[in-house]
Amino acid sequence: ETGVTQSPTHLIKTRGQQVTLRCSSQSGHNTVSWYQQALGQGPQFIFQYYREEENGRGNFPPRFSGLQFPNYSSELNVNALELDDSALYLCASSLDPPGQTRPDTQYFGPGTRLTVL
Amino acid sequence: LAKTTQPISMDSYEGQEVNITCSHNNIATNDYITWYQQFPSQGPRFIIQGYKTKVTNEVASLFIPADRKSSTLSLPRVSLSDTAVYYCLVGDSSRYNQGGKLIFGQGTELSVKP
């Protein structure tokens, strides 16, 4: 139990639609990262937020966007859904702010399984 | 960021010690080695992290030779509940690495049998 929760658990959308996924981080964790995990693959970094500002982005198009709120919750928004967006979406929170001397320990939620038809 | 290579799958039996080796030939001076565990339908979970020599915690041990070009995760006396995918990650801190992102490979799928 990491204290990180995500909603919904499962979601089915059709191509072209928009989706919002939600994450609630551990209290006190000001850094949240989002990952996409396709079936049989390791998670791929989408972006990270620190204190409501984007702090790094992976190789994902602009239709993937995010928000972080002061109450330790965050959102991942995906516009114009494509079939290849079907995946498990994971959020992870960490206590350490950016700029530490060793990699953060990231605490993952259980994920949201998105299916695009 | 250093690329890692680890076996795609491993089989073991309950009560055995399991060693999973990860190769990272181009590891950089600032890089740490971190292992995560992932059960089906769950997010990854931090197991252990090290820079050099040996690190041990209540779950596992991590052995890192002097040249740091490989590392070995050791799980003592595995049980059925240790069946999971194990990821070896090599990377530096968010001070150097944009956003402090974690770079996952395909991982090692460990299957523990009775």
Image (spheres, coloured by chain):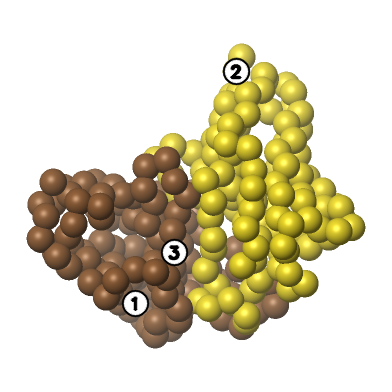
Q: Are marks 1 and 2 on the same chain?
A: no
Q: Nearer the viewer, residue B23 or B18?
A: B23
Q: Amino acid at mark 1?
A: Gln
Q: CA distance from mark 1 to mark 3?
A: 16 Å
Can residue A27 be seen here? The reply is no
Crowding at mark 3 (Cα within 10 Å: few <14, some 14-19, many 20+): many
Can residue B86 be seen here? The reply is yes
Instruction: Please name which of the two marks, 3 or 2, marks the residue nearer to the observer.
Output: 3
Residue A45 percent coordinates (x, y): 44, 64
Q: CA distance from mark 3 to mark 2?
A: 33 Å
Report if the CB atoms under discs 3 and 2 are less than 8 Å apart.
Answer: no
Report the chain shown in brown.
A
Residue A5 percent coordinates (x, y): 37, 56
Instruction: Please name which of the two marks, 1 or 3, marks the residue nearer to the observer.
Output: 3
| Apparent colour of chain B | yellow
Please, is residue A80 above or below residue B11 in the view?
below
Residue at the disc numbered 3: A45
For residue A68, the mark is 1
The residue sitting at the top extreme is B114
Instruction: Please name which of the two marks, 1 or 2, marks the residue nearer to the observer.
Output: 2
Subunit under mark 2:
B
The residue sitting at the front extreme is B26
Q: Are marks 3 and 2 on the same chain?
A: no
User: Which element carries disc 3, helix, strand or loop?
Assistant: strand
Residue appearing at x 60%, y 63% in the figure: A105
Q: Quadrant of residue B110?
A: top right
Residue at the disc numbered 2: B113
User: Which element carries disc 2, helix, strand or loop?
Assistant: strand
Q: Amino acid at mark 2?
A: Lys
Subunit under mark 3:
A
Crowding at mark 2 (Cα within 10 Å: few <14, some 14-19, many 20+): some
